[in-house]
Image (cartoon, rainbow, N blue to C red):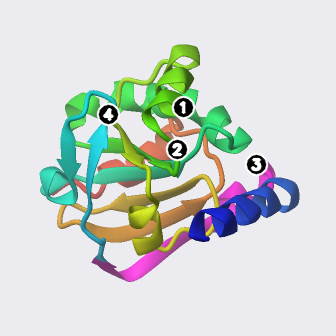
Amino acid sequence: MKILQIFVASLMCLGVFGKSHAAQLTREFDPPFPAQAFSLIDLDENVHTLADFKGKPLIVNFWATWCPPCRAEMPSMERAWQKIESEGIAMIGINVGEDFDQVFGFTADIDVSFPLLLDVDGQVTNDWPIQGLPTTYILNPDGEMVYRMIGSREWDDETLLDAIRDLRQ
């Protein structure tokens, strides 16, 4: 049911907000609060947990292959990853409700080298306050939510990346 709600909310964001309103959808959490723990597999069946990323800022992007804004922002996420990978910043994509074959097929069309995790049953999506796709959270090195962004972004924008870099300890 939650996945259906996210789908409907995503369609609403796509039609109502678009890219010109993306900056208005950034929310800063003050004070930051702990992100809900997770344990998910990637496309190589490696298990990743939230604790694995402790000690560095983390970009957590919730997305789906059927979501046009998600697909549109993925190349800029990959370009951002190429810039920040060696800077002590982590990035993951959490796919919402799709299986291995769907996500693997997506990567045949769009090159992604940061970890894509599978939330096949939607449990993590239910545990995090997702309102539409894509939704991205920026966590500080303590695993606390600092920012939430609903809608697509140009992730390789230096102003955006500098805000994330500023979270490093």
Which residue occupies 73% across, 66% down?
9
Question: If you read the primary sequence from the N terminus, does the residue marked by circle 4 or circle 3 appear first?
Answer: 3
Q: Secondary structure at mark 3?
A: helix
**Badge 1 density bin: few <14, some 14–19, many ≥20, Cα 10 Å:** few
Question: If you read the primary sequence from the N terminus, does the residue marked by circle 2 or circle 4 appear first?
Answer: 4
Amino acid at pointer 4: Ile
Q: Secondary structure at mark 4?
A: helix
Which residue occupies 50% across, 32% down?
103
**CA distance separating discs 1 and 4:** 27 Å
Callout in the foreground (2, 4): 2
Quarter of the figure with the N terminus: bottom right
Which residue occupies 54% across, 68% down?
130
Is residue 115 shown left or right of residue 99?
left
Front one among 166 and 18 = 18
Task: Residue under label 4, please give it.
Answer: 84
Task: Residue under label 2, please give it.
Answer: 98
**CA distance separating discs 2 and 1:** 6 Å
| Residue 69 image point, x, y percent | 69, 43
**CA distance separating discs 2 and 4:** 27 Å
Amino acid at pointer 1: Gln
Question: If you read the primary sequence from the N terminus, does the residue marked by circle 1 or circle 4 appear first?
Answer: 4
Q: Against 25, is 116 above or below?
A: above
Task: Residue under label 1, please give it.
Answer: 102
